[in-house]
Image (cartoon, grey):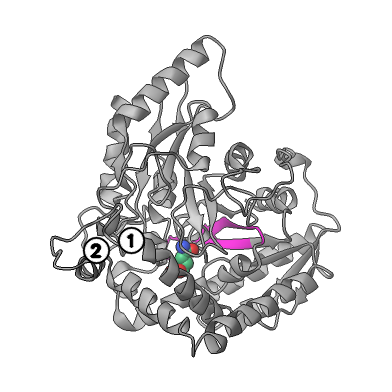
Amino acid sequence: GASLKKVIETKQFNAFITVSKNEAEKQAEASLQRFKSKQSKSDLDGVPIAVKDNFCTKDIKTTCASKMLENFSPPYNATVCQRLLDAGAVLVGKTNLDQFAMGSGTVDSIYGPTKNVWKCKADSNDFHIAGGSSGGSAVAVASGVCFGKKYWFNSFRAIGSDTGGSTRNPASYCGVVGLKPTYGLVSRHGLIPLVNSMDVPGILARNVDDVVSILNAVAGHDKQDSTCLTKPFKKIRLPPANKMGIKGLKIGIPIEYNCEYLSDEVLDMWDEIAQTLQNEGAIVKEVSMPHTQYSIVCYSVLNQCEVASNMARYDGIEYGYRADDDHSTEKLYAVSRRTAFNDIVKNRILTGNYFLLGRNYEKYFNQALKVRRLIMNDFDNVWEDAQLLLTPTTLTEAPLYSDFIQKTNRDQCAFQDFCTQPANMAGIPAVSVPIKLSKNGLPLSLQIMGRNLSEPMLLALAKYIE
Ligand code: GLN
């Protein structure tokens, strides 16, 4: 009881859409009994987890922060949630996001924006954004709020999703670790789709070891997701920090990631860490990935096309919001969708359908698939020179809400995803690691990327750096 009150104290940040108080208390009590009888199920037994509200949770509202699913309670758990429950974890609640995970700020939710915990003054009108779209999950972790009974006391770990950076972006702005696993390593069953060919569940925690504990519980084949890898997953065990060496490790610095709008502070920090790693024995060298610059445009075409087809399921008939206007079936569809989607979702549906028209298909969708292939090839080639890549995660510290929502900045907002999107295009794993505070006292982070299924090496370097 007392500890759930603390969760509700995070209200000032607006991190949670739903706190599943009764269920969480039952799970916590059961975990406590297991602990007392020395029958804890795993290292996650009793650990509180916050889950982004685009993962289905049985009989618990799953809204995607949209009016369309405002009253939707799924009849089943997403595989990720089920595996966490099976490991004894306590699912405390569902976190805020941009509507249907479209965005990078957690500012476009019908429940209002999530505020960054850093420099948050409850009484001021303005605040720094949490980043997104998994901003609620990042803030749950960063708030340091603990949940637990007498025998254990733990701060939150969280589940997000990552299609173009949605886990790493808020992790970067909020100063926590955020992992986008290899595509297909973690089941997407029960994750409400945005872009099926890029979506992955993401993991957020205060340190790399905590991220690993979650990955170990959720990764591995799931017959309910046909894109899930069938190869058995070997649990990751990282060596203790003092036993780690990076001697001879080849780390690439892709020069194209030094892009327009990258802040001087982030650039300097990137340089400084690269230099430190080199001094400590790594082989750090510049590499080139010439197609990086096309990633944002290419992503936006593919995203809109997949959104156009994914959103077709929300017709107001089977589930979700249904308008009163039922003069005709067409009218019912149209009014339901017009009323329940925000402008961002509607824009993407319209643009996506335009790209998919018979006369445009070649010119846009197919062309974007070809460019995606070139971006993927850049990665295939770069692994000949580097085992891991080191880049910024976001281009700046967390922007102020008032700046972020300006129309002119909104048009450029996709730019904040510049460094994160390519990993989704290629399906490779990537992790954001907090490094230091900016002059303004906000977190700054770097990203490490590796080839498919290189999580053990990727996370080892992340742990070394953190
Ligand atoms: N910002 C990107 C978008 O709006 C990525 C979002 C995501 O990763 N879910 O599509």
Which disc number belongs to residue 340? 2
- Mark 2 surroundings: few (<14), some (14-19) or many (≥20) residues within 10 A: many
Magenta: main secondary structure: strand
The residue under label 1 is 314
Which amino acid type corresponds to the residue marked 2 in the rendered image? Ala
Mark 1: which secondary structure?
loop
Asked if residue 156 is positioned above or below residue 106 in the image, the reply reads: above
From the top left corner, tell me how far across and down residue 257 is, in percent.
62, 76
Q: Nearer the viewer, mark 1 or mark 2?
A: 1
Residue displayed at 59% across by 65% down: 424
Q: Which residue lies furthest to the top in this view?
A: 37
From the top left corner, tell me how far across and down residue 431 is, in percent.
61, 56
Which amino acid type corresponds to the residue marked 1 in the rendered image? Tyr
Asked if residue 121 is positioned above or below residue 403 in the image, the reply reads: above
Asked whether the beta carbons under mark 1 and mark 2 sit within 8 Å of each other, the answer is: yes
- Residue 132 or residue 250, whichever sits in front: 132
Q: Earlier in the sequence, mark 1 or mark 2?
A: 1
From the top left corner, tell me how far across and down residue 240 is, in percent.
72, 38
Q: Write the start and end of the magenta stretch as one range.
A: 428-447
From the top left corner, tell me how far across and down residue 207 is, in percent.
57, 44
Residue displayed at 36% across by 57% down: 97
Which disc number belongs to residue 33? none
User: Gap in Å between the C-alphas at discs 1 and 2?
Assistant: 10 Å
Residue displayed at 42% across by 60% down: 133
